[in-house]
Image (cartoon, helix red, strand yellow):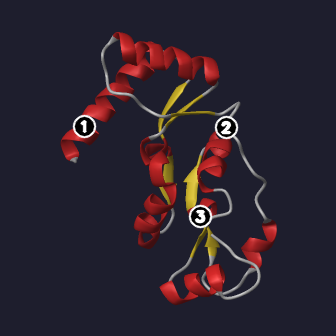
Amino acid sequence: ESKRDARLAETIGKLKAHLPGVHGRLTELGQVTQRAYNLALATAMGRDVDSVVVDNERTAKEAIGYLKDQQLPPITFIPLTTCKVSPINERLRTLGGTAKLAVDLIQYDPALERAFAHVFGNTLVCDSVEEARRLAYGSSERHK
């Protein structure tokens, strides 16, 4: 796994040097505010854990072309201008208990807010499995 991470970091470094508008890996652009939530947030990120944030679709297309030209492995890109972002349901911040919005547990540059909102959306993180089950299945309103 560390060999893969090292290769990915090297590839992203090359992209940053070659193209303006490449911000970096999503996991490196945000800082988890409480270490206890590291695993939960990595799980919530799912397939986007290694995604690279870029300014726009044009930069993503240029980066894909560069990766192909250099015969480097493919990477998923999140263009800030076109990524789909659903509005945060503010009511989820007041559910009580230990439930917290995943996006609230990460510190990041406000310019990258769309990328984090795209990945986490209205995902909740709880301290216990019991509370998570209650929120997910316990009432007529279901939460992720």
Q: Residue at x 64, y 87 (%)?
A: 97
- Which tag is nearer the camera, tag 2 or tag 3? 2
User: Where does residue 103 sit, x and y in percent of width and height?
Assistant: 62, 59
Q: How many marks?
A: 3
Residue 129 location in percent, x, y? 49, 84
- Picture coordinates of residue 42, whole percent (x, y): 44, 59
Q: CA distance from mark 1 to mark 2?
A: 27 Å
Asked where in the image residue 89 lies, by quadrant, the reply is: bottom right
Which secondary structure, mark 2? Answer: loop
Would residue 110 be visible to someone looking at this image?
no
Seen in the image, is 139 located left or right of residue 105? right
Q: CA distance from mark 3 to mark 1?
A: 27 Å
Mark carried by residue 6: 1
Do the residues under discs 3 and 1 have CB atoms within 8 angstroms? no
Q: Would residue 76 be found to the left or right of residue 94 on screen?
A: left
Residue that numbered label 2 is attached to = 83
Mark 2 Cα-neighbour bin, 10 Å: few <14, some 14–19, many ≥20: some
Few, some or many residues within 10 Å of mark 3 (<14, 14–19, 20+)? many
Q: Earlier in the sequence, mark 3 or mark 1?
A: 1
Q: Quadrant of the C terminus?
A: bottom right
Q: Are marks 1 and 2 in contact (CB under 8 Å)?
A: no
Q: Which residue is mark 3?
A: 102
Q: Secondary structure at mark 3?
A: helix
| Residue depicted at 62% across the width and 65% down the height | 123
Q: Residue at x 57, y 64 (%)?
A: 105
**Res 96 → quadrant:** bottom right
Disc 1 marks a residue whose amino acid type is Ala
Q: Tell me: residue 14, above or below residue 128.
A: above
Could you tell me the amino acid type at mark 2? Answer: Cys
Locate residue 128, reporting x and y percent: 50, 85
